[in-house]
């Protein structure tokens, strides 16, 4: 279930992933007027194996 949708921190997040995966400081494929969002997902169930 989606718990929150926010634009706050989304540009910084994509830049951090860009640095990690392609070694550039800024995401190079931004389009004009592009708005990034982060969807925060809340789990409905969790399962664990063992103790």
Image (cartoon, grey):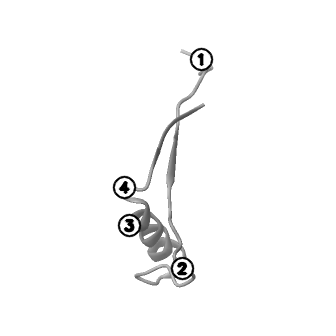
Q: Find residue 9 and name its label.
A: none
Q: CA distance from mark 4 to mark 1?
A: 38 Å
- Camera-side residue of 3 and 27: 3
Residue 30 image label: 2
Looking at the rendered image, the disc whose residue lies closer to the viewer, 3 or 1, is: 3
- Closer to us: 29 or 50: 29
Q: Is residue 36 above or below residue 31?
A: above
Closer to the chain start, of discs 4 and 1, is 4
Residue corresponding to mark 3: 12
Answer left or right for 11 relative to 36: left
Residue shown at the point (43%, 72%) measured from the top left: 15
Secondary structure state at the residue bearing disc 1: loop
Tell me which label, 3 or 1, sits earlier in the chain: 3
- In the picture provided, is 2 more to the left or to the right than 12? right
Residue with the mark numbered 1: 50
Choose between 27 and 35: the one closer to the eye. 35
Give the x, y percent position of residue 35. 50, 66
Q: Residues within 10 Å of mark 1 (few under 14, many from 20)?
A: few
Q: Can you tell which of label 4 and label 1 is closer to the viewer? A: 4
Position of 13 with respect to 50 (left or right) is left
Residue under label 4, please give it.
8
What count of labels does the image hold?
A: 4
Does residue 6 appear left or right of residue 1 in this picture?
A: left
Are the two marked residues, 2 and 4, in contact with CB atoms closer than 8 angstroms? no
């Amino acid at each position: 279930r989606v718990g929150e949708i926010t634009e706050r921190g989304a540009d910084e997040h994509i830049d951090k992933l860009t640095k990690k995966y392609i070694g550039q400081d800024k995401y190079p494929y931004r389009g004009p007027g592009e708005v990034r969002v982060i969807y925060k997902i809340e789990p409905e169930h969790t399962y664990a194996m063992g103790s």
